[in-house]
Amino acid sequence: MNSLEGQFLVAMPDMADERFAESVILIVGHGDEGAMGLVVNHELANLRFADILDELDLGDPDAVIRLPDAIRDRAVMRGGPVEKGRGFVLHSGDYHSGNTYKVTEDIGLTATLDVLKAMAFGPAPRAALFALGCCGWSPGQLENEISANGWLTIPFSHELLFDIPVERRYDEALAVLKITRASLSTEAGHG
């Protein structure tokens, strides 16, 4: 199988693992060692970006309080069940630190505190998504799950990642394939 890095996985409606039900995952790494991705459509309830800034003591408390609501109230995504306490930021390619991993020409992944400071106090990336935790697959595991009809794949879309409201990303991902939840069959199409 070719690398799925930079593509989305979309969970089939009958996904047995409830941690991934109705998930859209951006694959940020895929090779012989396995795969890694971030769920981009499930927010952590009752946790906002300002809470993370406070918890990590990343700015003067008065400065954090004065941040615009759009920054303070930014959602924190549930990136996956692996390393749940570790933060990951998917961001537009205009931001780069020495610790940024280039996922595609237009998207980077940074997992260090410098990107959080930039998101809060500037210079911020044009677009960014912050997640706690990630998804991981051992060698061959993701390929087996796709073969077993657990996931659909769709090409990368900046709009899906950053612009479409979180609660609509799953349905919009299905719409890319011109399907809906109702039209999906749980049986693989073997002729």
Image: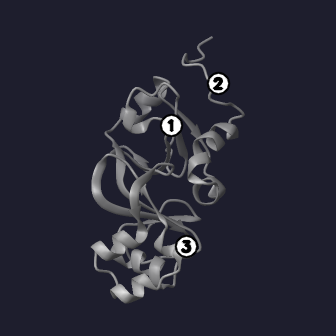
Give how far across and how far down residue 191 sits, in percent: 63, 11
Which element carries disc 2, helix, strand or loop?
loop
* Image-based side of 134 in relation to 11, left or right: left
Q: Is 113 placed left or right of 175 in the picture? A: left
Disc number for residue 139: none
Percent x, y of residue 36: 39, 49
Q: Residues within 10 Å of mark 1 (few under 14, many from 20)?
A: many
Q: Residue tagged by mark 2?
A: 182
Q: Which residue is mark 1?
A: 22
Up-down relation of residue 4 to residue 77 (above or below):
above
Q: Which residue is mark 3?
A: 70
- Position of residue 170 measured from the top left corner of the image (x, y, whole percent): 58, 42
Q: Amino acid at mark 3?
A: Ala
Secondary structure type for disc 3: helix
Q: Earlier in the sequence, mark 2 or mark 3?
A: 3
- At horizontal 69% and vertical 31% (from top left) the residue drawn is 179
From this view, report whether residue 39 is shown above or below residue 53: above
- The residue closer to the viewer here, 50 or 182, is 50
Report the Cα–Cα distance between label 2 and label 3. 35 Å
Q: Nearer the viewer, residue 161 or 147?
A: 161
Element under disc 1: loop
Residue placed at 41% from the left, 35% from the top?
142
Q: Dot 3, crowdedness within 10 Å: few (<14), some or many (≥20)?
A: few
Would residue 121 be found to the left or right of residue 112 on screen? right
The residue sitting at the top extreme is 191
Residue beneath the point at 42% across and 47% down? 30
Q: CA distance from mark 3 to mark 1?
A: 26 Å
Marks 3 and 1 close (CB-CB < 8 Å): no
Q: CA distance from mark 2 to mark 1?
A: 13 Å
Q: Amino acid at mark 1?
A: Glu
Query: Residue 129: horizontal and vertical position, in percent?
Result: 49, 63
